[in-house]
């Protein structure tokens, strides 16, 4: 395979197959925009590489030039040439259309799920020892006040959950309370959805502002019951120091 | 030499354009699957009068509804743990002057205290879906609520900003009518798109607004309505938009794009041919 143009083509197809089909075997599938970026980079790089020298330029561009001018072409090559000339403007037209066509989708909202808590809630420690009694009481309070949304199994699938947007947090998911300190949960339970900063979109959250109904002691015990029931541990200062 | 360099650049540009177009088209993401619930209500643009008085009009059935899940109101007291209305189908249309929104939901019994409501944010300020209640870190705005109750036989245009602040507005702009048939309510709310009342949501075709829903099953149980006041089925915010009038100018740009691309091809080939013959 001497022709640099063919080499560049094979490289590009190979790169696409690798990014789209082989890489996802080992990691999460790549978003289209990233695949596009990589393909564009591969294409630009191979074009520059193969056209660095004068001879390379002729090898690379020569066939393209002959293809475009149609010199000495007949049969399939001639048909392909006409197709390329037809497809390119249509592709440009299609791109223009998709960029301009009005979208039926509402504007995307980037809601921050765990925004920073206010200063007064940072570093608070649970004042209750982790005894079986405290955990049991916490679980009882959880069942009464939290389970309708967050679920009896701590999985965010309570009977009231399907109606809300955003959905109630799933505590058994390692991405929720396992990433947070007890003080963070204390803030979120006490101040509720309306306590969120603007990036948390407080206007959408159905989480009650429990400080009006539950004493702090109950909230701390609920937190204890929540971690125990969801089989998660809070993130602590000690762990971070070890890291 | 100079000509060669020019040809190289021109050809390279052409190849890059084709390459980018091709990689863009192979790289497109598939739409996510398995999403049942909707995220938005679309008010379809129609001509002529809207079927505001007839929830069973054929033109309603021609519209593909959006569907939203509802939850028992557990956000603030008095809460409720179990509600009758679990989902709602929403259809909408407008004619450039007026709009109509029809909600369709299941309720096995027809009762005078059965009720339905639409809620909107007013203006640019974000408002909490629970009656625009106070938010701690964000300055919130008011909500506009369109309320219908079977016993009233009409719609009421209301405002709220915080709990216990809900009241009927001085300027009433909302009409509503409901029909119950075989366990299903169909309630149509209607209003002019623009009302000139600062307490109202103003609907501008092409612009997104926020909408939420609430329903009450007024069936009498031991002499009291099963659901009343804050005990109701609710949703949080979703989006709504009145369809804009189609903008045909974009087809002009599409034609222009095609013409520029074709012109580029023509001059490119001509240049290469001249270069070869030089």
Image (cartoon, grey):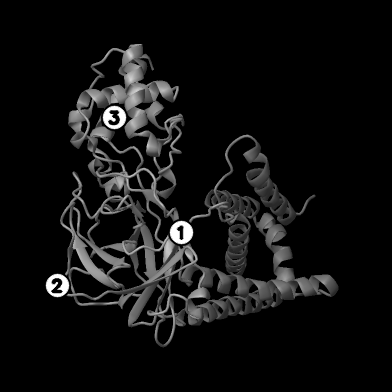
Q: Nearer the viewer, residue B215 or B38?
A: B215
Q: Nearer the viewer, residue A81 or A67?
A: A81
In this rendering, the answer to whether A144 lies above or below B90 is above
At 32% from the left and 46% from the top, the residue drawn is A205
3D distance between C-alphas at marks 2 and 1: 35 Å
**Helix, strand or loop for disc 2:** loop
Residue B47 image point, x, y percent: 43, 86
Q: Which mark is residue B170?
A: 2
Residue A179 image point, x, y percent: 39, 28
Residue B178 quadrant: bottom left
Residue B204 quadrant: bottom left
Image side of residue A239 versus residue B29, left or right: left
Mark 3 chain: A
Task: Residue lying at the far bottom in this picture: please name it.
Answer: B48
Q: Which mark is residue A184?
A: 3
Q: Is residue A165 visible?
A: no
Q: Are tags 2 and 1 found on a single chain?
A: yes
**Helix, strand or loop for disc 3:** helix
Instruction: Identify the residue under disc 1.
Output: B108
Q: In the image, which is nearer the foreground, mark 2 or mark 1?
A: 1
Q: In the image, which is nearer the foreground, mark 2 or mark 3?
A: 2
């Amino acid at each position: 395979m001497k022709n640099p143009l063919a080499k560049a083509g094979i490289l590009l197809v190979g790169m696409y197959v690798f990014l789209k089909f082989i890489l996802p075997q080992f990691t999460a599938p790549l978003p289209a925009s990233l695949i596009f970026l990589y393909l564009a980079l591969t294409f630009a790089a191979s074009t520059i590489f193969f056209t660095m020298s004068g001879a390379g330029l002729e090898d690379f561009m020569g066939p393209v030039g002959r293809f475009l001018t149609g010199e000495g072409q007949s049969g399939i090559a001639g048909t392909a040439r006409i197709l390329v000339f037809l497809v390119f403007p249509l592709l440009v037209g299609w791109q223009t259309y998709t960029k301009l066509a009005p979208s039926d989708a509402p504007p995307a909202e980037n809601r921050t799920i765990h925004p920073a808590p206010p200063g007064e809630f940072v570093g608070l420690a649970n004042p209750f020892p982790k005894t079986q009694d405290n955990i049991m009481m916490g679980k009882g309070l959880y069942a009464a006040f939290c389970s309708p949304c967050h679920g009896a199994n701590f999985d965010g699938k309570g009977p009231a959950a399907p109606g809300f947007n955003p959905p109630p947090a799933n505590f058994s998911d390692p991405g929720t309370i396992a990433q947070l300190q007890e003080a963070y949960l204390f803030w979120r339970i006490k101040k509720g959805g309306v306590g969120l900063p603007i990036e948390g979109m407080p206007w959408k959250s159905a989480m009650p502002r429990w400080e009006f109904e539950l004493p702090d002691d109950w909230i701390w015990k609920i937190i204890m019951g929540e971690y125990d029931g969801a089989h998660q541990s809070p993130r602590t200062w000690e762990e971070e120091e070890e890291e | 030499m100079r000509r060669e360099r020019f040809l190289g650049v021109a050809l390279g540009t052409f190849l890059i354009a084709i390459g980018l177009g091709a990689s863009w088209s192979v790289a497109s993401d598939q739409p996510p699957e398995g999403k049942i619930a909707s995220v938005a209500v679309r008010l379809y643009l129609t001509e002529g009068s809207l079927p505001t008085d007839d929830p069973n009009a054929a033109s309603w059935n021609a519209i593909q509804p959006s569907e939203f899940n509802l939850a028992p109101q557990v956000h603030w007291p008095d809460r409720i743990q179990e509600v009758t209305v679990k989902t709602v189908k929403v259809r909408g249309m407008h004619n450039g002057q007026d709009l109509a929104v029809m909600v369709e939901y299941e309720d096995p019994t027809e009762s005078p205290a059965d009720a339905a409501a639409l809620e909107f944010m007013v203006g640019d300020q974000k408002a909490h879906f629970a009656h625009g209640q106070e938010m701690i870190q964000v300055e919130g705005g008011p909500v506009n609520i369109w309320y219908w109750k079977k016993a009233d036989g009409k719609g009421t245009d209301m405002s709220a900003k915080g709990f216990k602040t809900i009241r009927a507005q001085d300027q009433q702009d909302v009409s509503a009518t409901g029909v119950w048939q075989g366990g299903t309510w169909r309630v149509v709310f209607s209003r002019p798109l623009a009302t000139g009342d600062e307490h109202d949501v103003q609907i501008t075709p092409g612009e997104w607004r926020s909408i939420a829903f609430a329903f009450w099953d007024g069936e009498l149980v031991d002499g009291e309505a099963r659901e009343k006041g804050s005990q109701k089925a609710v949703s949080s915010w979703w989006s709504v938009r009145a369809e804009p009038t189609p903008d045909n100018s974009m087809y002009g740009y599409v034609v222009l794009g095609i013409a520029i691309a074709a012109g580029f091809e023509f001059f490119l080939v001509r240049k290469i041919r001249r270069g070869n013959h030089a």
